[in-house]
Image: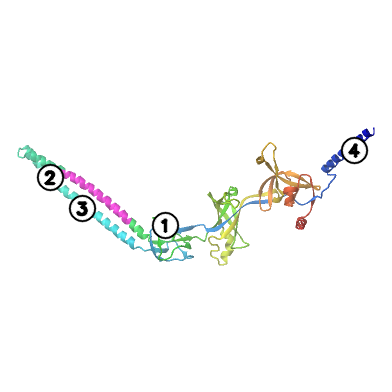
Amino acid sequence: MASKSSNRLIVILLIIAALLIVGVIVAKKMGFINTTKPTKVSTEATSRRTIIELVSGSGKIQPEVEVKISPDVSGEIVELLVEEGDSVKKGQRLARIKPDMYNSLVEQAEAAVNSAKANAANAQARIKQLEVQRDQQQRDLERNRQLNREGLLSQVELQNSETLYQSTLMEIDAAKESTKAANFNINSAQANLKEANNNLGKTTLYAPMSGIISRLNVKEGERVVGTSQFEGTEMLRIADYANMEVRVDVSENDIIKVSEGDTAMVEVDAYLDKKFVGIVTQISNTNNSTASLAASTDQLTNYTVKIRLLKSSYADLLQNGKSFPFRPEMSASADIQTLTLRNIITVPIESVTLKVAEDSLQSAQNMAKQEIVFVESNGIVLEQNVVSGIQDDNYIEIKKGLEEGKMVVTAPYRAITKFLKDSTAVEVVSKEELFKEELKE
């Protein structure tokens, strides 16, 4: 009997212990028992504001118009009349290539024209000579025919007269064809003469536009190759410094947001603490791929966007005596304003994080991602699903899921992304206090 009583007592104690454990677990879940300290967080109320979406890129300043000057003919530079940095006017003489060989070619072409004209004149004279001979033979043939009818001339002599007349007619036709050929030779020789004169004229180079000599690649005495042969030698460049643009690279993820006419804020490394205003004028259709920093085998696809700098944004520099405040190849960066939304609900960017919920029926590669924020209420945070929109450097648009005035957790970022869960107890403190706590840690 004692043994049965002992066993019953043990069973009762085990049941009581199990009930106590279950009670503790339920109490913890209900919040009646809290064994950990509340997580310190800072919060900020959702509010309405204006957000300007920005697409950033970096690149170089270049003239909008820059012309490369290459000679059409080859030879030695005997005159170079400009230096790098000189201002030139349209039509101004820039350089001269030694013309001796091209003068000789002109003289040869002129001689060929004269020779062709002489041949044509000879052919024409031959026609006239044969026509006179034809007329005489025609008269002789008519007389011989009459004599043959009267029995005074044999048939053989008449046939000889007719043959001689027909031969002269054929010689006239051949002479006319020779005249045509001679005229063709004249046209060909004149075309060669025209080309020779053109090449002679091309030995002197003139400025096709007004501007600045932005690059000079040759010196007097050097030999250059004309564009009629291979690629040709680039002798110099003329740029219009009055109209400058920034050419920046924009990634493939952002290029679809950019449109012609978008406003851009441009920073030039040479002018610290100053921003210039520009307008997007052109978006390239071909990509400019550069090796990715993350992996040498990957390619980061970029597209070039051209941004014209507005003179009104650097008028003060012009007033200070800087005729051309920008130079080619100056480094610059641009923030392109692609979209502006006003009076929209926003939260700080760091408040929004992703919650990954893996479907047990799917593989790990097919995990669904949901944007969430943590809303603070009465000492706990509630997980709230949201849909975000555009963003700037500090705030992000909330399209769905939050009302104005809700207090959302903004820091610490590590807690938002890793530690906070639905119904986590929190203590709201200032960002300054959080910063001090992180320094202590």
In-image side of 345 versus 251 (left or right)? right
Which residue in the protein does label 4 denote?
A: 13
Observer-nearest of 86 and 36: 36
Task: Give how far apart the Cα atoms at labels 4 and 1 are.
Answer: 102 Å
Q: Is residue 332 magenta?
A: no
Of marks 1 and 3, which one's residue comes earlier in the chain? Answer: 3
Q: Is residue 377 above or below residue 359?
A: below
Of marks 3 and 2, which one's residue comes earlier in the chain? Answer: 3
Q: Nearer the viewer, mark 1 or mark 2?
A: 1
Task: Give how far apart the Cα atoms at labels 1 and 2 are.
Answer: 64 Å
Residue shown at the point (11%, 44%) measured from the top left: 139
CB-based contact (under 8 Å), mark 3 and mark 2: no
Which residue in the protein does label 3 denote?
A: 122
Observer-nearest of 226 and 61: 226
In-image side of 396 versus 287 (left or right)? right
Please provide percent x and percent y for residue 201. Answer: 36, 60
Residue shown at the point (22%, 47%) measured from the top left: 176
Magenta segment? 167-194
Q: What secondary structure prevails in the magenta region?
A: helix
Q: Nearer the viewer, mark 1 or mark 3?
A: 1
Is residue 48 in view from this perspective?
no
Q: Secondary structure at mark 4?
A: helix
Of marks 4 and 1, which one's residue comes earlier in the chain? Answer: 4
Q: Is residue 439 above or below residue 179?
A: below
Q: Secondary structure at mark 2?
A: helix
The tag on residue 232 is: 1
Which residue in the protein does label 2 denote?
A: 137
Q: Nearer the viewer, mark 4 or mark 3?
A: 4
Three-letter code, disc 2: Gln
Three-letter code, disc 3: Asn
Q: Nearer the viewer, mark 4 or mark 1?
A: 4
Three-letter code, disc 1: Gly
